[in-house]
Amino acid sequence: MTVTTDRDGAIATVTLRRPEALNALNGNQLNALLAVATTLSADVSVRAVILTGEGQRAFAAGADIKEMAEMDPVQALAFTRLGHAVASAISGAPQPWIAAVNGVALGGGCELALACDIRVASQNAAFGQPEVMLGVIPGWGGTQRLPRLIGAGVASELILTGRRIGADEALRIGLVSAVYPSEELLGQATAIARTIASNAPGAVQAAKRAMAVVHDTDMAAGLAFEAQAFALSFATADQKEGMAAFIAKRAPNFTGS
Ligand code: DAK
């Protein structure tokens, strides 16, 4: 199995398992990841997903260069569409995905992390979009998601030079939200996932959807979307429960209804 899923209550951990190639992503692995993401999206008992790579060296060292090397443009288009489908399955999933970047996240590996809602990294993590050094460009959303996340100037410098950065710089430019010692990374990612899972599921999902609209619309339409989603949350039992629990000074018991 090149992609595995472990469940711990409401949290699913998805692991890329091709350590002999530093978890480089080939067609088989992308199809497996797409199937996993689709299955998890349909499972209402999953409230947060962690994505990581097997071993200490790599989250994912990119698209599989050996598989790409001989592609013609038609095959390249299919490959890029498959990568887009995987990234969209993650970014469009109802539940938040957390990338626990445990080593290199280069090229397609970085783009996979960019598709997640939250990124945390180990101290030995490294990020980069080195595609121009291989004669191609980022093909799984990097030219679109990286500028949106960290700003056009810094994204341009990274994508046009192919420069690799370490975890501390990734933290400074907002590419990741926290850096931990390697041995603490999964525990810390799980703690974030548990916190998310303890919140009202419908509210978490609506907040994720509302934030995604930022990329597709202007301010006025985005605020209109937010207003509708906010109003709709008052139709849920979890809204009544959350506010009643606050007033009663007790912990809420969210049911997802
Ligand atoms: N693809 C295939 N195999 C890879 C790989 C990759 N991206 N990265 C590493 N490996 C393999 C190595 O070939 C080696 O395998 P063997 O030779 O032992 O069989 C094994 O993993 C261990 O790697 P190294 O021996 O190189 O390990 P080191 O510690 O010396 O170096 C490294 C680690 C991460 C610095 C180095 O492996 C490296 O530079 N890897 C390549 C990183 C990279 O350039 N990644 C970006 C790939 S390009 C598109 C679609 C998609 C994309 C673009 C366009 N369209 C269709 C338009 C995306 C492109 C990319 O992601």
Image (cartoon, helix red, strand yellow):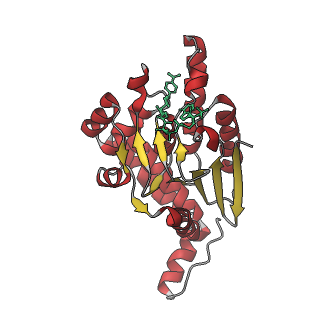
Residue 178 in the image: state x and y as whole percent: 40, 60
Left/right placement of residue 207 relative to residue 133 reads: right
Q: Foreground residue, 234 or 195? A: 195
Q: Residue at x 29, y 32 (%)?
A: 156
Which residue is most to the right?
A: 1
Q: Foreground residue, 135 or 211? A: 135
Query: Quarter of the image containing the N terminus?
Result: top right
Q: Foreground residue, 75 or 222? A: 75
Which residue is most to the bottom?
A: 249
Q: Residue at x 32, y 44 (%)?
A: 150
Q: Is residue 181 visible?
A: yes
Q: Residue at x 58, y 60 (%)?
A: 202
Left/right placement of residue 133 relative to residue 4 reads: left
Q: Is residue 192 visible?
A: no
Which residue is most to the left?
A: 153
Residue 80 in the image: state x and y as whole percent: 55, 25
Residue 226 in the image: state x and y as whole percent: 42, 52
Residue 66 in the image: state x and y as whole percent: 59, 24
Q: Is residue 222 above or below residue 56?
A: above
Q: Quadrant of residue 252?
A: bottom right
Q: Is residue 101 above or below residue 218?
A: below
Circle count: 0
